[in-house]
Amino acid sequence: MASSTKAEKTPDNVANMATTDHALARGKTDLIGLFGPQNQMSALIRTPRGSIKRVEIGETLSIGRIVAIDDKGIMVSKNGHNRRLTLPAS
């Protein structure tokens, strides 16, 4: 059944707080969200092609294997080097 609720325009102050220009660079993998219980967190990433993917520890991406996810971001390991992806600064 269709909803009869009419969508309203987002107030400018809300849109401004929720929007950061150029927060994500094109052509690279970016972390865009973290969620789940502390001991079993998942993450949302944006791939270099722009698609959104939910990932968990143990999955392999083009940038490496996800070895940890916590409230600070995700740790990725590739060729013996570790790096952390964090959420974009607000």
Image (cartoon, rainbow, N blue to C red):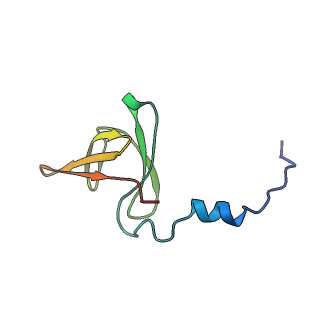
- Residue at x-position 61% and y-position 65%: 16
* Residue furthest to the front: 13
Provide residue 45's location: percent of width, then percent of height: 41, 52
Is residue 59 shown above or below 25?
A: above
How many tags in the picture? 0
79 relative to 42, above or below: below
For the view shown, which residue lies furthest in the right direction?
4
Is residue 23 found left or right of 12 in the rendered image? left
At 59% from the left and 61% from the top, the residue drawn is 17
Q: Is residue 77 left or right of residue 7?
A: left
Q: Quadrant of residue 15?
A: bottom right
The answer to which quarter of the image holds residue 14 is bottom right
Q: Nearer the viewer, residue 90 or 23?
A: 90
Q: Does residue 34 appear left or right of residue 65 in this picture? A: right
Question: What percent of the width, then of the height, locates residue 60?
Answer: 28, 46
Residue occupying image coordinates x 29% and y 38%: 58
Task: Return the residue nearer the eye: 37 or 56.
Answer: 37
Q: Position of residue 6 (x, y in %)?
A: 84, 55
The quarter of the image holding the N terminus is top right
Relative image position of residue 88 (x, y in whole percent): 42, 59
